[in-house]
Image: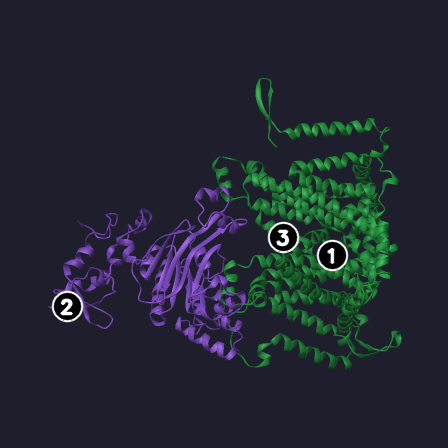
Chain colours: A purple, B green
Amino acid sequence: MASEISPHPVKLACRGVWKIFGDNATRFLADKNNAPSDSELIDAGMIAAVRDATLEIPEGEIFIIMGLSGSGKSTMVRCLSRLIEPTAGEVLFEGQDLLKTSPKDMIEIRRHKMGMVFQHFALLPHLTVLGNVAFPLEVQGIDKKTREGRALEVIELVGLSGREGYYPRELSGGQQQRVGIARSLAVEPDIWFLDEPFSALDPLIRREMQDEFLRLQQMLKKTIVFITHDFDEAIRLADHIAIMKDGEIIQIGTPEELVMHPATDYVAEFTRGIPRAKVLTAQAVMEAPTAGEYSVQVRFDSRLEELGANILHADKPFAVIDENEAVIGQISRDAVLEILVGAPNDDADTGNAGAS
Amino acid sequence: MTALTLSIGGRERQVNPWFFIWIAAIGIAVGFYFLREAAPWAFKYPRGWIIPLRFWITDFVKWLLNGFDLGLFTFKELTRSISWLVEQPYDMVRSLLADGFKEGQGSDAIEVFPRVSWIAAVIIVAMMGHFARDWKLAALGAACFFYLAVFGQWDSAMVTLSSIAIAVPFGVVGGISLGILGFRSPFFRAIISPVLDLMQTVPVFAYLVPILILFGFGPVSAMIATIIYAMPPMVRVTMLALKQVPAEVIEFGRMAGCTTRQMMWKVMIPSAKPTLMVGFNQVVMLSLNMVIIASMIGAGGLGFDVLNALKRLRIGEGIEAGVAITLLAIALDRLSQAIAHKAQPGHEVITRNIWQRHPYLMGAAGLLVVTWGLGVFFPSVQTYPESLHLTTGTFWDGVVKWININFFNQLDGMKNFLLLNAMIPIKRFLLSLPWVVVVGFVTLAGLQLGGWRLGVLVGLLALFIVVVGQWPKSMITVYLCGMAVFIAGCIGIPIGIYAALNDRFHRFIQVVVDTLQTLPSFVYLMPVVMLFRVGDFAALLAVIAYAITPAIRYTDHGIRRVPPHLIEASIAAGCTPLQILWKVRLPMALPEIMLGINQTIMMALSMLVITALVGTRDLGQEVYIALTKADSGRGLVAGLCVAFIAIIADRLINAWSVKRKAELGLD
């Protein structure tokens, strides 16, 4: 379903994953040829939390699974990490089917290649910050000096230096989640699961943590599966978003694609209030370069809203540059203005008064 | 059950069909009285029909002891090695606290090293209080122990304390292990749950008998009984605590790559620690209660002093030992609670010095060394000088005498009035009921409240009591228990209501109830014997005093839990305070109050067995006789009957409460 072919190899993928809760769910699903209808599920008293999910997560990307409560997103991420055993399907991690991996190998994979951050932090109350962060290393049997040295590094990374000796109950929610993040990074995981990591935090702290998260990702370039029910958060952080409803993935795409081309009314409903300037990138609106003079250079992946600050002083077009700082296109001041001031894709958005 | 629709006087009325079923049942019951001649078996269960279960059990235990061979070793050797295992640490601790370390046998023994001196013990208790909470707790603990020294109860108290010091770790470790097994394996849980139910309802005396037979008379079998008695709540608390560990924390453990063992010991047990500590407090208090009771099979210590005083009717001595038990109980309860709820330390300040890292431990060690040294030169440091002992024994004897001289007529009149007008008629009525009818009624109540499953269960339990031939004694138990619960309810519920409505009284009654609950059941016997000597009436009062606390506590709690918006709505609707109480608070709190009554019944039954010591003639007496005659079958069968009465009452009331709560939309 992903319309854009990513330049990166696939790190984690799942194919035809089902999770059905109920007695003898496996046999039930097999009897129905892996395609039970709604009425068949209801008649059998089964609840399908995840239905026939297929997705691919490229290396180094932030992949967001978005859905409202009850949409199956939490079950989905637990199927991907095999915290829950899917009823059917395969989960491929670096090409290996996790569902066929022995419990012993699974422990090894989790110890060295996976990290997870939880909504309610899941810190161990009897350990200090240092003890919590070093815990995943401790269970691997790494000696105290080495693991605490490594833990101190990640604690510094998340900005909690000086709090190593504190207990979780002595920290604020935001600080606790920083500990959760540090702890999940201590083993240098290849894939990083975040299950609604900021949902339990106040809006101001949430914003701060999102910035912090983006800063970390810029440095670490992890492959990330991020769960949220907050579409704004998804738009802000995601490279790709999968939208789930009633256990089904109904659309996968970049934030831009979801806003500009929602696959269903349900997706359109979500994207309604989102100003286009927040999602459109420079690349998406640029025109071919005319080799004239430019006022400011902008990166191809910057969002149009970021251009707003410069617009008053820009009497010439913006230059769009790629990763190697080569000019690949230009955007006229009027084009930016039109998107900023003008039409969001719906009149429901009143952020720009007096628009057409 | 669907309601029937009746047409009465032209108006349609919904009538519960159970109404007619009960009318019919009562009709049949009355019919039995006319058939008295035709069906005498329905009134008095024929001797020939009795299943000789008690003899089977007695023979079985004898066989276990003499004939049972497990291949590599015999059963007797097994029990002996268990005794040995428990005896070793017990001897150590008892030498340390009570007897001193000795070499040689009997009276020729020479003390090689003295016990902990009384001064050191008092100060260490104070240090524990300060460590666990604050100076106030330190002062309370020290005062309680100082009393023991001053009033000459030290030796007995230290014997009791050494039993507890051994029983608690065994109970906690055993309880946690079984709890973990139960948590992990649904199969094991299915086996252990009914056993735990039974252990908590079978009166303690009943399993003293087989333990007495298997392990002999003495402190070790008392210890084993104590461990068995104190362990079930720990098993339950462990299973509950592990279940309550947040799912996310367990998921984290799995994602961190924990093995099964790491998950249990590094993630789950530490996360469950606050709840587990509540279980620790319970084990401490139950151990104390049982160590006192187990003086009947040779535990010695304070319990033996009370028992001895009771047997010889030396009220003064008994009360003195009773007060010592009370103070020991209060000190242990407050200390163990403070340790359980101890605020976790804040972030660590790095210190290197061992004195700074463990100030209490090092302080205590230093204190022990110093007092041992001083004790060599000054014996009064080692043992509180006998010449300075105070005694209140003669004072209490005087009080008893004074009461008997001045109030004998009033007290005796009250006793006789109640006996003649209420207790004896009710007892006669219950004894005259045909067992067939009672079993039928119990079954019917079960059917109505919980469906056929419950009906069959309670019916079979009641039938068991009949077929093992314990019906008359069971009815006396029901009568005493019923009277006690009724009176406890009449006193306790109004107190609870008042406590719920008045915060100051609530705080006061909370302290009283907390204290009453920490007291071992034995202690309650002393004052009633002092006032009313032996008999049903004295027993009744002791049972009421012991069992009243849940009636107060649950009423208070239930009324306080009524949702505040309901109260606001009724105030807005113009209810008077009295109307709010009668029409809103009480109906909403009733299910909770009934759970309190249920607890009262359970406690009353457990106390009833102990009141056999003051001369009741119910199942308690049966168990007590079995204990003195070391007849395990007789004791267990009577004990099971008490347990089954408890289970019947418990299941019926619980079923009602659950049903009613669901109807009221609570929980």
Image quarter where the N terminus of chain B lies is top right
Q: What element carries label 2?
A: loop
Residue A119 position (above or below residue B112): above
Residue B474 point in image, percent of width and height: 80, 43
**Residue type, label 2:** Ser
Q: How far apart are marks 3 and 1 (CA)?
A: 18 Å
Residue B14 point in image, percent of width and height: 59, 26
Q: Do labels 3 and 1 share a chain?
A: yes
- Give the chain letter at badge 3: B
Q: In which quarter of the image is residue B344?
A: bottom right
Asked whether residue A292 is in view, the answer is yes
Residue B445 position (above or below residue B534): above
Tell which of B310 and A70 is nearer to you.
Answer: A70
Q: Distance between the residues labelled 2 and 1?
A: 88 Å
Q: Nearer the viewer, mark 2 or mark 1?
A: 2
Mark seen at residue B510: 3
Tell which of B578 and B310 is nearer to you.
Answer: B310
* Image-based side of B185 in relation to B441, left or right: left
**Residue of label 2:** A295
Q: Nearer the viewer, mark 3 or mark 2?
A: 2
- Give the chain letter at badge 2: A
Q: Do labels 3 and 2 share a chain?
A: no
Q: Which of marks 3 and 1 is nearer the N terminus?
A: 3
Q: In which quarter of the image is residue B34?
A: top right
Mark seen at residue B520: 1
